[in-house]
Image (spheres, rainbow, N blue to C red):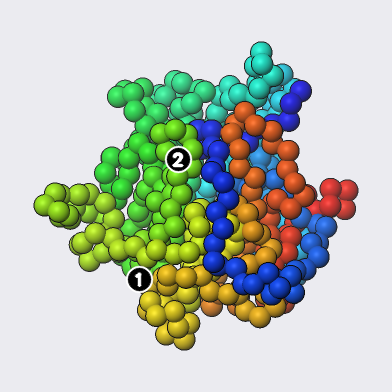
Amino acid sequence: MKKLFKYIFASALSLSALCLTSCHDSIYEEINKEVKLESWGINGDIYSIIRAGDYIYLSNGKIYYKTNKPSTETGLQNRQWHKTNTPSTYAIDYVPATTNYIASDSDYIYALTLFWYENSSGVNKIKYRKIYAAEIPTNPSSGLSWQEIDCTSISATTSSNIRIIFDNQAVESADRAAYVNLYSDDDEAFHVYKLNGTNQPQLIPDGTNGTGSDTISAVYFPKNGQTYFSGYYTMTANDEYIYYTTTTTNSSNRVSTDSKIYRANGYGTYTSSGSEITGFTLDSEAAVSTSCDASGILSLAVTKNYLLVGSTSGLHRVVLSSTGDSTSIDKIPYTKCAAFPSQNNGESIITEYCFKVFVLNPDLNESEGDEYCTSTIYGSVSGSSDSWDETGLYAYYPGRGKWNRDGTSNTSSNGN
């Protein structure tokens, strides 16, 4: 039996060759910053990192959680994650089910679980997909009580009806909402639906703040209290701007990356070259972009003074200053990556694909709070899911002062 193959969205993804960037310091400085990797760490490709109640959760086929109290308060660093139960591990042809994506709102955690089978060529394929909901527990140590969400009245198809689930990333629980991109049998098209606990999801009309058949992400905008949607991999926001890139999966089922960081503060119709265009706007005009040297950008997370950037060339940060002066923040991304603080090994800890970045407290300056990133191997669904030891979860804790692996305290699995 072959090992379980990777799954990203509904399509097979394979990326182009690694692009070199000028974000790195000289090779000698990078060598000086190298640190020995801690042996304890969660491995594999991590698809989601979310907030839910008093905890944060992540998924890599399995589900893990830890407290959302900062390390400056707990005094704890690595080995603080705990594994919890997934909705199902039911195996078809000896291939176990995996929970690849999770999302949350103020009351529930949601899980997208994939059920696999091995075809006649020995390749693992998705047989069907299901969405589950569990009430957010006060203490998740006793597990999550999952219940399947019945979507058959919307879509009777089971193998490809669900593209992805996601939430709007709101820091405050009361502002958080979760969504699914789901196929409708009525008009034979995909739409965005708001998840509603164990009840049937509610349709959001196409065009609502960017919703459409290709929507795979959302962000809550504190400035006006609205949620915006896109077909791009990543969006983040502070009280002034929505930041995003146009990285997506193209028609050839390959990742089409973008090195530009766009900023917007709304969504609507504007005029460009005499034509009316609907999309993200900045003061009712077209969103403005900044060309950055971070290679293909896969993920963004905002802090008070920097954007944390996950890209095809690793982990970077970009100062939110149009002049590049970190003492003068106007919340406009600079055109070049900025070095991490002295002896912080941010540039060297991950130098290949960094799929996900996550900041625990966006109100703090970068490096003043807990931060997370993931190292991922990309490949097609029909490629091997064998993982290198270096893939998986990494964290920066102010008390540790460096990026390093992050995981559970399970000695038998080395923190996995």
> Secondary structure beneath disc 2?
strand
Say the numbered circle drawn on residue 249.
Answer: 2
Residue 40 seen in this snapshot: yes
Q: Which mark is residue 240?
A: 1
Pick the residue in front: 88 or 378: 378
Image height of 317 relative to 65, above or below: below
Quadrant in the picture for residue 361: bottom right
**Is 260 in front, or is 263?**
260
Which amino acid type is shown beneath numbered disc 1?
Answer: Glu
**Residue shown at the point (55%, 28%) measured from the top left:** 129
Residue drawn at (62%, 79%) of the image = 341
The residue positioned 60% from the left and 58% from the top of the image is 314
- State the image quarter where residue 241 is shown: bottom left
Q: Nearer the viewer, mark 2 or mark 1?
A: 2
Q: Crowdedness of circle 1 by 10 Å Cα count: few (<14), some, many (20+)?
A: some
> Label 1's element?
loop
Q: Position of residue 7 (x, y in %)?
A: 59, 36
Q: Indicate the quadrant where residue 81 lies.
A: bottom right
x and y, in percent, of residue 143 in the image: 70, 45
User: Callout 2, which amino acid?
Assistant: Thr
Mark closest to the chain's N terminus, 2 or 1: 1
Which residue is pictured at 75% across the width and 46% down the height?
Answer: 388
Pinpoint residue 244: horizontal percent, then vertical percent: 40, 58
Distance CA(mark 2)–CA(mark 1) = 28 Å
Drawn side of residue 251 relative to residue 5, left or right: left
